[in-house]
Amino acid sequence: MKPDNIIDAIGNIDEKYIDEGALDKAPKKTSPLRWILPLAACIAFVIAAVLLFPKADPAPADSEREPVLQGEESSEAESSSEDISLEESSEDTPIPKEKLLWSGRIDEGVPDSNLTSSYSTEKLSDDITVMKSFYKYLTEEVAGDEFVAFGVRCVNFNTDTEAFTDVKEQRQSAEALYKTLLNMWQELYLDYEAKGINEGEIRAKILSDPEYAAAYETAYDACIAVAKAELDTRGELGEEYIKHLQSKGFKLLYGVENEECEAYLHLNGFVAVMAGTKEQFLALKNDEVPGKMLFCPAYEDASQLNFGFSYGIEPYLPPPAEFTEEGLTAKLAELYAQSPDEKLTVRIYYNLRYPTKEEAYERGWRSLGYESKADYERDLNANLLDVYTVQQCIMVQREAMNGKREKQAVIDRVLKEGELFDTEAAGIMVTPYLRSNCVYANLSYERALEVAADEAVAYIEIADFNYSINPIDYSIFYDIQTDEPAIS
Amino acid sequence: MEDRDIIELYFARDEKAIVETARRYKAYCFAVAHNVLGNREDAEECVNDSYMGAWNTIPPQRPANLRAYLGKIVRNAALKKWRSRNTAKRGGELALAYEELAECLPSVEDCPAQSLEATELTRCINAFISTLKDGERRLFVGRYWYFYSVADLAKSLGISQSNAKVSLHRLREKLRTVLEKEGYVI
């Protein structure tokens, strides 16, 4: 029996169980402290508010759904108990979002973790650069009583070397498994091809090969295990550190348990968005714990970020040896001949020279108007650049590293209007921070030949959108939901 | 507006039924769909589909519990979407072929043998749930009907996450034993 059967059968259980099982009907074993303290704080605050602001304006009606912070009046009572979270005592007078100073954003929140590379030193140095600049911004431009929202990101800053090494080893091991899988596929493919079997049958044969299936399962499990292990490690670190911050008076705005706000948790490592005053924030500079944690400027619109995380693997596979230009042309002709449609969706593989790291770096500082690297670094090191400027520069560098401009130039040159395939509408994940090496387009046979002949195009192939199993053309994307809806 | 009034609107084929359903149960339906899909847009689409599902099935159905009835519809819609999404991402040819062939098969409702089997399985699970203690029942239904996260369930039930995980593990073992006794091969 498949899990699907059980999941479906459970879907039809007695409605009384369904009704009572909803969380809003579940009784909570609440500790008296969980409501006595907030209630006491609330009463104290109401009394203070009546005394101090007898004609205070009511809170705007739409502030209910805004992220809120308690006022100072409640913070003392609350900081005495780490168990009391922001949401649980939200009856306290909130500080509306408008009064909250969002500290900006680092990138666009797209997962860029790649199985083949551990958390890169470049990325880490980006983060440190932003943080340096953020401290300056905080010190010079933020008033002492303003609340600053920031993301808590669980990165092992190489201080927790054991965990870091574990993750690294797991990744290497998963990478090795994928390479084994790839080799196995290629060997089987060539064997079957030599026997004159057509591609469709080859795929079916390989997929039904028990040895291949076992290797695939092992590799896939390893991959998931790696992701989960990393997530768990960071999750645990995050929980520990959030508690620590709460004990220092910081408030949790978006946490992993905050379904409504949808905290952002994926391999980039954000586990929560928290807020504190400038003083509280700066005081943490000398805190012992942040050695293994990293603060990040928070996202302005964390509510748009998804729960769970996505993990993308898009290795650079060289075209198989049999994909010669002539072979490919023949293959295309065959496939187009089989197709009843005039146009087919093809993958166009770029033939690009990606900018070097130094060139990408240069594009970054030039985008800020600097004429020389020395000038840029002088200002950067003197903390003369604000956080947004530094972020902008880093974005330009990353886009350059990923060949964004070069790819766009190829697309503009080889494709005509209306030919670009809308990957988003088709549900294909695009990971701009990876060096995605192809673009999709709808082309007629004649146009496909024209495009393939362009020197900026390495080769093209028919896109079948068949993800995951076939490593020859694979792009493996999977989502780990908040938890997988399956019974093990 | 009470459930019975909303149901009357459905019976009167009054489109206000959908408005009132949305007003009362949108958040609930969204939570059910979102737990499955983890994606706001998809979840909203499922919720909208579920209103249409209710409109198309009431009448002749007259749900005794509108909330649970809607929950079932939206859960099914969300699971369908989740499966199709995952098939598209990692299904491969076999899965596609399976899907193509599946189109030729009658739906479970149309196939007496399969329908009977599904009903029988649900009966077993209902019987299993009825033997559970209150907290266990909420945990099981919360996890496997609503797909709440372990963290949310633990928080809601006032137990630790590890406690919830262990309890769920034991519940699965119990269910496995029950199903094996009933002759299901797992």
Image: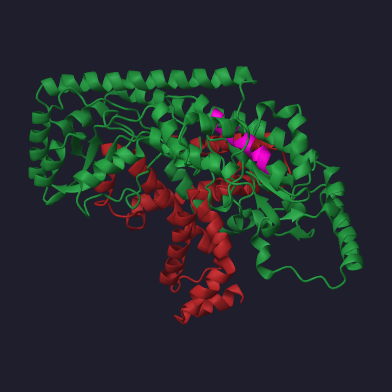
Chain colours: A green, B red
Residue B67 coordinates in the image, percent (x, y) = 57, 64
Give the magenta range.
Answer: A125-137
Magenta segment includes A134: yes
Residue A34 coordinates in the image, percent (x, y) = 81, 49
Residue A362 coordinates in the image, percent (x, y) = 43, 32
Answer above or below: position of A464 versus B69: above
Magenta segment includes A168: no
**Residue toward you, B141 or A404:** A404
Q: In which image quadrant can residue A232 be found? A: top right
User: For the point 90% across and 62% down, which residue is it?
Assistant: A48
**Residue toward you, A64 or A207:** A64
Q: How many marks?
A: 0
For the stretch drawn in magenta, the main secondary structure is: helix
Residue A116 coordinates in the image, percent (x, y) = 42, 24
User: For the point 15% across and 41% down, which residue is it?
Assistant: A451
Horizontal side, residue B139 vs residue B46: left or right: right
Horizontal side, residue B183 vs residue A442: left or right: right
**Residue toward you, B139 or A117:** A117
Q: Quadrant of the N terminus of chain A?
A: top left
> Looking at the image, can residue B136 be seen?
no
Horizontal side, residue A440 vs residue A2: left or right: left
Answer above or below: position of B18 versus A268: below
> Looking at the image, can residue A336 be seen?
yes
